[in-house]
Image (cartoon, rainbow, N blue to C red):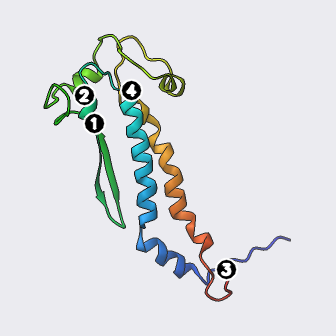
Amino acid sequence: MTSFEWDTRCADVELGRLREGFTTYDHANFSRVLLENFARTQVYVHVITGSLKGSGVADVQRATNRRFQAEIRYGGTSTGVKNPVRYAPAEMFSGAPIAYVQQRSLETYGPRAAGDHNFMRPTQFIDDELIGPVSSFISRGRRTRHPERGV
């Protein structure tokens, strides 16, 4: 016969920790994933004048203990020749020839079709990459000291 016993004495401690929400450590992990993805988009951007690449922004819009909201966007103010950049969406779906693609991007995200300037393609796996930081937040309680046993 098999029996199971659940130790729920510290459930309130763990629920309290989860209720307190994200810490600075969690925000740093989420930001790391955001910045890694932004760096990949920068490699993938079609560069002629540098305006489109210069308009790229990785922006944390809201970071509280309950929510982390961020975005990567292109267009608007730029350090390049064309300022502001109004053509980011058109460039992303354009059929113009590709000027430069770094080899690592080709290996990681596959070859581009002729005229493919989809500089946001490297972000297609961002949800999978965020699983690690979210899992870290949820499972961190396993290392919490048990108040009754000291373990």
Q: Residue furthest right?
A: 1
User: Mark 1 sits on what residue?
Assistant: 56
The answer, for residue 72, to whether it is visible in the render is: yes
Circle 1 SS class: loop
- Residue holding disc 2: 52
Can you tell which of label 4 and label 3 is closer to the viewer?
4
| Residue sitting nearer the eye, 14 or 94 | 94
Q: What separation in Å lies between label 3 and label 1 (alpha carbons)?
A: 50 Å
Residue at 49% from the left image edge and 57% from the top image edge: 134
Please tell me which of labels 3 and 1 falls first in the chain.
3
Separation (CA) of disc 2 from disc 1: 7 Å
CA gap, disc 2 to disc 4? 11 Å
Residue 7 is marked as: 3
> Residue 84 location, x and y as percent?
13, 32
State the residue at coordinates (53%, 28%).
108
Asked if disc 4 and disc 3 are in contact, CB closer than 8 Å, the reply is no
Mark 1 is on which residue type?
A: Gly
Q: Which numbered disc, 2 or 4, marks the residue that appears first in the sequence? A: 4
Mark closest to the chain's N terminus, 4 or 1: 4
* Residue type, label 2: Leu
How many C-alpha atoms fall within 10 Å of the one at disc 2: few (<14), some, or many (≥20)? many
Q: Is residue 37 above or below residue 114?
A: below
Q: Residue 151 placed where, x, y %?
A: 68, 81
Per the image, the residue denoted by label 4 is 44
Pick the residue in front: 110 or 41.
41
Q: What element carries label 4?
A: helix
How many numbered callouts? 4
Which label lies toward us, 2 or 3? 2
Question: How many residues crowd around disc 1 within 10 Å: few (fewer than 14), some, or many (20 or more)?
Answer: many
In this view, the residue in front, 76 or 128, is: 76
Decide: marks 2, 1 in contact (CB < 8 A)? yes
